[in-house]
Image (tube, grey):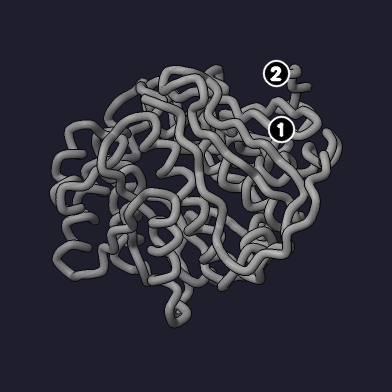
Amino acid sequence: MPATALPRDAGHMRVVPDVIPGPERLTGLVSQAVRAPSSHNTQPWHFAVGDDAIDVFADRTRSLPVTDPWDRELTISCGAAVLTLRTAARGAGLRAETVVLPDGPDGDRIAELRLTTAEDATIGERQRAAAIEMRRTLRGPFSDAPMPAGLTAAMADAAGREGATAVPVDDGEQRAALGELVREGDAVQFHDPHWRRELASWLHPRRRGDGLVVPPGTGVLTRAVVGGANLGGFVAARDASLVEAAQHVVMVCTVDDEPLDWVRAGMAVQRMLLVAAADGVQAGFLNQPCQVAVLRPRLRLLAGGLTPQLVLRFGVPQSAHAEPTPRRPVADVVERRPARI
């Protein structure tokens, strides 16, 4: 599969001379790119920064072999980081010429971005860049406030611009069918002791900077309970109710199911999340039907034959001050990019 170049956003442009931005400025962009979402908050990426280019690599040492045996969600997470990097660059007045999978679908290099100074960012680009720090992943219920008018269409457009399709699941029968798939996914996963132990291994205190946050005083007990007990019934009932109550539910889908599609899905979902966050709306993930292989054919039928990569619920948060998910120090994920001919 050939590498794929991505077009820049169209619109009125004020062209300025190209200037090499320098590694310090590009490292600042990486500090925003790491705010992208990732499965279990594994943050499975690292970045090679040069004078005018950034390579985004998959860090497969942070994989989830039980949950994600083919590194599908790991690649999606890296795609979200690529989109976040592009968005931060545009907000800073830089142009990012992006090539996805430059070494082919089996390589660890997810994208190469060449950056130069460019035209002023549009209002929409600035809003999305500002939303990088505003975006949150919510695991509890939303408020009863309605979604802003026109936002669902804007999110669908955002997904389409990155090569994916946002399939809404707002019809009553479809929502019930999806809720049942989520319920079954929870039951299957929690029944597997290997899956439970993998989940428990990523329950970390906030100071660790990654994983799913648990209070430091109860972390050991929480990991023991999650790793040893089958909580599938409780979790399934909770997640099914979250599906039912959400103001908007979407499956992010692609035509095929190859690494390029996974990268596109990651870029699409992050662009959707930033468009939503700029309008005061946040999301939670319900990816169990995508993760459990025996459920994916039924999920595909629900998506009209497309391949669902992610399932999200959207709504207005109950509080506007949710604490951000922790991130590792930027120094831990950045290295110097060697000169390339």
State the residue at coordinates (58%, 35%): 211
Q: Which residue is mark 1?
A: 53
- Asked if residue 27 lies left or right of residue 77, the reply is right
Between 28 and 101, which is closer to the camera in this rendering? 101
SS class of the residue under badge 2? Answer: loop
SS class of the residue under badge 1? Answer: strand
Residue 37 % position (x, y): 55, 44
Residue 327 % position (x, y): 69, 39
In the rendered view, would you say 167 is above or below 49? Answer: below
In the rendered view, would you say 65 is above or below 225? Answer: above
Between 37 and 91, which is closer to the camera in this rendering? 91
Q: In the image, which is nearer the foreground, mark 2 or mark 1?
A: 2
In the rendered view, would you say 269 is above or below 141? Answer: above
Whether residue 85 is visible, yes or no, is: no
- Asked if residue 69 lies left or right of residue 136, the reply is left
Whether residue 255 is visible, yes or no, is: yes
State the residue at coordinates (51%, 66%): 276
Q: Earlier in the sequence, mark 2 or mark 1?
A: 1
**Dot label at residue 234:** none
Q: Residues within 10 Å of mark 1 (few under 14, many from 20)?
A: many
State the residue at coordinates (44%, 69%): 154
Label 2 sits on what residue type?
Arg
State the residue at coordinates (21%, 43%): 184
Label 1 sits on what residue type?
Ala
Residue 101 % position (x, y): 48, 28
Between 76 and 256, which is closer to the camera in this rendering? 256
Q: Which residue is mark 2?
A: 340
Mark 2–mark 1 contact, CB under 8 Å?
yes
In the rendered view, would you say 84 is above or below 161? Answer: above
- Asked if residue 61 lies left or right of residue 227, the reply is right
